[in-house]
Image (spheres, helix red, strand yellow):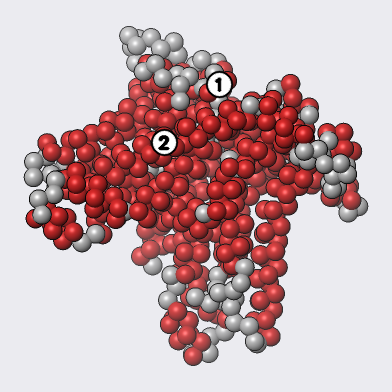
Amino acid sequence: MTAALDAPGKPAERSLHWLRWLILAFGALGVLYPIGLFLVNSLKTNAEFVVTPLSWPSVWAFENYVVAWQKARMGRLIVNSAIVSFATTILTILFASMLAFGLHIFRFRGRNAIMASVVMTLTIPAQIYIIPLYIVVISLGLINTHLALILPYTAGSLPLAVILFSNYFAGLPNEVIDAARMDGSSNFDIYRRIMLPLSRPVIGAVGIFTFVGAWNEFFLALIFIQNKDLYTLPLGTQVFATSEYSVDFTLLFAAFSISMMPMLIAYLLMQRQFIAGMAGGALKG
Amino acid sequence: MSRLGAIPWIAPGLVLFFVFVQFPILLQVWMSFGPDSMDMTAAPSLRHYVELVHDRKFGTALGHNVHFAIATVIGKVVLAFALALALNGDFRGRLFFRGVFFLPVVISFVAIGTIWGFMLQYQLGAVNGTLRAMGLGWLALDWLGSGRLAMWSVIFVDIWKWTGFHVVIYLAGLQSLPRDLYEAAEMDGASAFQRFRDITMPLMRRYTMTNVIIATLGAFSVFDVIFIMTKGGPFNSTQVAMTQIYLNAFQFQRFGYASAQATALLAIMGAVSIVLLRLSQRVDTQ
């Protein structure tokens, strides 16, 4: 585990130790400095920012946040993003676990073909088929509704979610299901009382990558939502940035800072789960 | 057990998946042979594909995708490998640094594009501000406003956002390395550099392939970072396939032609992933 960099003592390896801290410090500074500077500037008056964009604020302009909250309708945007993201996450977990369970329990011919047809599109992002998707969304009368986002997001999350649930179910000992069946449990009981509780780690991983994906998605929202009352955070802040307020830089900074806060707080609280959920899928998929 | 019993379990997911993924992909291929007007009775024709082959703008845009792909893949892989090596091992602060590197992955590109849009802004941006303060004013360039530099700027921002993701994949690889191999090599008198070159590097190839595949496919469908930061400009220097498709479909209402472009892009991505998967299989069997 201590491959090449973790053996202090000998001179050559001690210098490697310095190299490690140098790399880590540069990396961390590279990530934190732009975000930090952005947050600091969001607390300046616009007049001060234009003169000294790199300094500490001489007057703290907390009112930027109050004004931005109202002008950019941040409360509305956060609620809309929450509706879309939670609905997408719940539907994805439900449909993916049911699909994987159905294919696990009923071992009929053609189940591998069904699995393959879902997995095949794993690497195709929704924006590639945005034009026909737009036509589907219009034909179903979903344009300018949150369902125009929730349903495509859910469908797009299904391949990876189904892979993760299927692999997990396949790894569980068959005795678990057999024993329950002996006791006379129905399939529904087995799904709800045994399989779902057992797959908590997968539910967590699927939940996180689905939620973060839906929360940050911009392109589909840009095409499908024109009603201001339905804007999600990325779309609403982007529109705000190109509105008549675009010259009030620090007001914009405040709006974007507010828009990042929910995700930053969630990430701070559940860093480990976020990293495992978002990168773990790529390793298993 | 009867296959009918499976229907209530698998139908909801499969129907949703068909309506919002599989059917649109098929419809797009069909639309690419139809007229722009969405007249469903028109006879299929290849004219959009003929136009596509002669479309200089789309050709240039695809060239930008290739440029973007090569530069971001190299940047992400090299940086992520260095950061993962530095993160590997047991020491205090490891989780902190890992958490910091991964942070941009969870922030939306809309916010990141805005943050870096201001960092790279010519007059007030921190990058030029710092350069001028260091007496390097001649290096303070118009990073997003110059046709020569804008592409490199969005490449940089894309690397900045995704490197942490690739770090975590490399870390998983480094942590799966067999420890006894290193101990045996050390017993045999292999230096730290030799152990790195002869054990770490070969065993990490599969993880490099995973990272290359993910980053390459992302590069061919890139849209958000470019739309937010440059909108394809200045002077079309950052136009990529997706911005062209967006313009043709949703600004010029040319659904048939844009469908042909999207179908071509999908075919290119398919070809690229087949080549990369072949390569990674060869790496695996080595």
Q: Which chain letter goes with mark 2?
A: A
Callout 2 secondary element: helix
Q: Earlier in the sequence, mark 1 or mark 2?
A: 2
Residue A217's x, y, as percent?
A: 52, 35
Q: Which chain letter goes with mark 1?
A: A
Query: Residue placed at 16% from the left, 61% from the top?
Result: A175
Could you classify mark 2 by the number of other residues whose Cα lies within 10 Å: few (under 14), some (14-19), or many (20 or more)?
Answer: many
Callout 1 secondary element: helix
Query: Residue placed at 41% from the left, 34% from the top?
Result: A87
Residue type of the residue flagged with mark 2: Thr
Q: Is residue A58 left or right of residue B8?
A: right
Give the residue number, with chain letter if any, for mark 2: A88
Q: Marks 1 and 2, how far apart in space?
A: 19 Å
Where is A4 relative to A32, above or below?
A: below
Residue A212's x, y, as percent?
A: 50, 43
> Is there any visible trace of residue B206 in the rendered image?
yes
Give the residue number, with chain letter if any, for mark 1: A229
Q: Is residue B42 left or right of residue B124?
A: left
In the depicted view, which residue is nearer to us: A172 or A196?
A196
Residue type of the residue flagged with mark 1: Asp
> Is there any visible trace of residue B121 in the rendered image?
no
Q: Quadrant of the N terminus of chain B?
A: top left
The number of numbered badges drawn on the structure is: 2
In the depicted view, which residue is nearer to us: A60 or B62?
A60
Dot 1 and dot 2 residues touching (CB under 8 Å): no
